[in-house]
Amino acid sequence: MSIPPTRKKSVFQLVADLPHLVIELVKEELAHLKDELVAKLKHAGIGIGLFVVAGVFLFFMLMVLVAAAVLGFATFLPGWLAALIVAGILLVLIVILVLIGVAQLKKGKPVPTETIDSVKRDVNAIKGIGKRQEP
């Protein structure tokens, strides 16, 4: 077997080929990124599905525990009063969780202000308006 002779290129031909090579490299990297993300998202989807099924079973388990609490109170109180007591306890828990949730939502910012500022600095640096400075 003989190795085919390689054609020598001039510097100008190499520089002329550079944009094509960079474009090919970027296309290959994007294809690789897409394949990797699809594989990871597939696993994430399966994991999320399993969490949903576990959440459904957790809901049923909690309903059984609520029924057990009502039956437990019903051993020394009338059934209707036992159910009202358990409902009151659940209502207090719900109110506490809602108040904590509202407080957490108020702390969150829906707009990624730091990233927007960073992108603006990058654009200004490219335009030559300002220098890129780290925050």
Image (cartoon, helix red, strand yellow):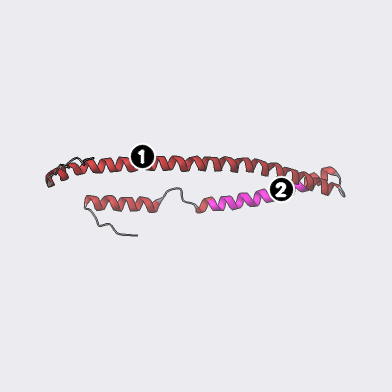
Three-letter amino acid code at the position of disc 2: Leu
Q: Residue at x 37, y 42 (%)?
A: 32
Q: Going from the N terminus, do you reach mark 1 or mark 2 first?
A: 1
Lateral position of residue 27 relative to residue 63, left or right: left
Q: How crowded is mark 1: few (under 14 residues within 10 Å), some or many (20 or more)?
A: few
Instruction: Give the labeled residue for mark 2.
Output: 90
Q: Residues within 10 Å of mark 2 (few under 14, many from 20)?
A: few
Picture quarter with the N terminus: top left
Lateral position of residue 114 relative to residue 6, left or right: right
Q: Which residue is drawn at 59% across and 41% down?
A: 50
Picture quarter with the C terminus: bottom left
Please tell me whether mark 2 sits on a helix, a strand or a loop.
helix
Calculate the distance from the C-alpha at mark 1 to the C-alpha at mark 2.
51 Å
Lateral position of residue 8 relative to residue 43, left or right: left
Work out whether residue 11 or residue 53 is closer to the camera in this orientation and state it: 11
Instruction: Give the labeled residue for mark 1.
Output: 31
Q: Which residue is drawn at 70% across and 41% down?
A: 60
Residue 30 coordinates in the image, percent (x, y): 34, 41
Please tell me whether mark 1 sits on a helix, a strand or a loop.
helix
Mark whose residue sits in front, 1 or 2: 1
In the rendered image, residue 106 lying in the magenta stretch gets the answer no
Q: Is the magenta stretch mostly helix, strand or loop?
A: helix
Residue 58 coordinates in the image, percent (x, y): 67, 44
Residue 125 coordinates in the image, percent (x, y): 25, 53
The label shown at residue 46 is none
When asked about the image quadrant of residue 78, the answer is top right
Work out whether residue 12 or residue 45 is closer to the camera in this orientation and state it: 12
Three-letter amino acid code at the position of disc 1: Ala
Residue 6 coordinates in the image, percent (x, y): 17, 42
Work out whether residue 105 or residue 28 is closer to the camera in this orientation and state it: 28
Q: What stretch is highlighted in magenta?
A: 85-104
